[in-house]
Image: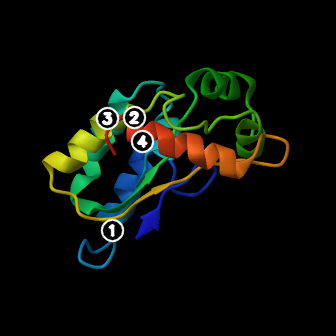
C-alpha cells in the first residue's frame, strides 16, 4: 500500500489520483489517511475526506485515523509554514478535536464492508504532551462514537 503524506511527492488529491492511474490496482492499494488527506485538499471540512473516500475507495486497503485542526491548518497555509512547523503547532490533533468526522468515515467504511485495518496515527512531539495520555484520549473518543 502507498501512504500519501503532507510534504511528500504525493500529497494532494490530484497527485494521489495520478499515482493510482499509473499503477496496477491488483498490486498497489492506498493507505487512506484522513488527516493528511484533509490537509492536502486545502479544505477544512470533513466533506473533503468523504469525497476522497468516494473517489479512491476501490483502492483503499488500509486506513489511518488522524484528525486535522482546521484553525491551525488555515494559519499554516496563510503564514506559509513548512510541514514540521505546522505539526509542531498541533496541526494533527487528537481524534474528535479537529475537522474530520470519524462517525461519517466509519459509516462510509461499514457501508462498503471494509474489513481491513485502521490505525490511529497521532503526532505527539517532544513538548506537546504525553503519548500514553494522548493515546488514551483517542481510545476514549473512539469508544464514545461506538468503536
In this rendering, does residue 134 appear at all? yes
Mark 4 and mark 3 lie on one chain; the one further toward the N terminus is: 3
- Could you give the CA–CA distance between mark 4 and mark 3, rounded to whole angstroms? 9 Å
At which x and y percent is residue 2? 44, 67
Q: Is residue 67 left or right of residue 147?
A: right
Q: How would you rate the neighbour count of disc 1 (Cα within 10 Å): few for under 14, some for 14-19, many for 20 or more?
A: many
Could you tell me if the residues under marks 2 and 4 are in contact, i.e. CB atoms within 8 Å? yes
Could you tell me if the residues under marks 2 and 1 are in contact, i.e. CB atoms within 8 Å? no
Q: Which residue is mark 2?
A: 144
In terms of depth relative to the viewer, which is nearer, 75 or 23? 75
Q: Which residue is mark 4?
A: 142
Q: Quadrant of residue 127?
A: top right
- Could you give the CA–CA distance between mark 2 and mark 1, rounded to whole angstroms? 30 Å
Q: How would you rate the neighbour count of disc 3 (Cα within 10 Å): few for under 14, some for 14-19, many for 20 or more?
A: some
- Could you give the CA–CA distance between mark 1 and mark 3, rounded to whole angstroms? 23 Å
- Look at the numbered disc 1 and give the secondary structure of its residue: loop
At which x and y percent is residue 4? 49, 56
Q: Residue furthest right?
A: 127
Could you tell me if the residues under marks 4 and 3 are in contact, i.e. CB atoms within 8 Å? no
- Could you give the CA–CA distance between mark 2 and mark 4, rounded to whole angstroms? 5 Å
Mark 2 and mark 3 lie on one chain; the one further toward the N terminus is: 3
Task: Name the residue located 48 percent from the left edge and 25 percent from the top edge.
Answer: 44
Q: Which numbered disc, 2 or 1, marks the residue closer to the eye?
A: 2
Q: Which numbered disc, 1 or 3, marks the residue closer to the eye?
A: 3
Could you tell me if the residues under marks 1 and 4 are in contact, i.e. CB atoms within 8 Å? no
- Look at the numbered disc 4 and give the secondary structure of its residue: helix
Mark 1 and mark 3 lie on one chain; the one further toward the N terminus is: 1
Q: Is residue 89 left or right of residue 139?
A: right
Q: Which residue is mark 1?
A: 29
- Could you give the CA–CA distance between mark 2 and mark 3, rounded to whole angstroms? 10 Å
The numbered dot on residue 103 is: 3
Amino acid at each position: 500500500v502507498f501512504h500519501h503524506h503532507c510534504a511528500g511527492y504525493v500529497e494532494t488529491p490530484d497527485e494521489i489520483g495520478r499515482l493510482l492511474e499509473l499503477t496496477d490496482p491488483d498490486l498497489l492499494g492506498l493507505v487512506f489517511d484522513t488527516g493528511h488527506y484533509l490537509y492536502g485538499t486545502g479544505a477544512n471540512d470533513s466533506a473533503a475526506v468523504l469525497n476522497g473516500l468516494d473517489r479512491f475507495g476501490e483502492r483503499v486497503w488500509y486506513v489511518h485515523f488522524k484528525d486535522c485542526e482546521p484553525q491551525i491548518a488555515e494559519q499554516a497555509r496563510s503564514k506559509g509554514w513548512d510541514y514540521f512547523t505546522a505539526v509542531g503547532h498541533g496541526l494533527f490533533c487528537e481524534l474528535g478535536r479537529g475537522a474530520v468526522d470519524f462517525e461519517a468515515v466509519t459509516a462510509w467504511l461499514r457501508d462498503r464492508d471494509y474489513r481491513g485495518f485502521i490505525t490511529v496515527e497521532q503526532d505527539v512531539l517532544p513538548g506537546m504532551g504525553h503519548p500514553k495520555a494522548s493515546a488514551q484520549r483517542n481510545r476514549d473518543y473512539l469508544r464514545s462514537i461506538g468503536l
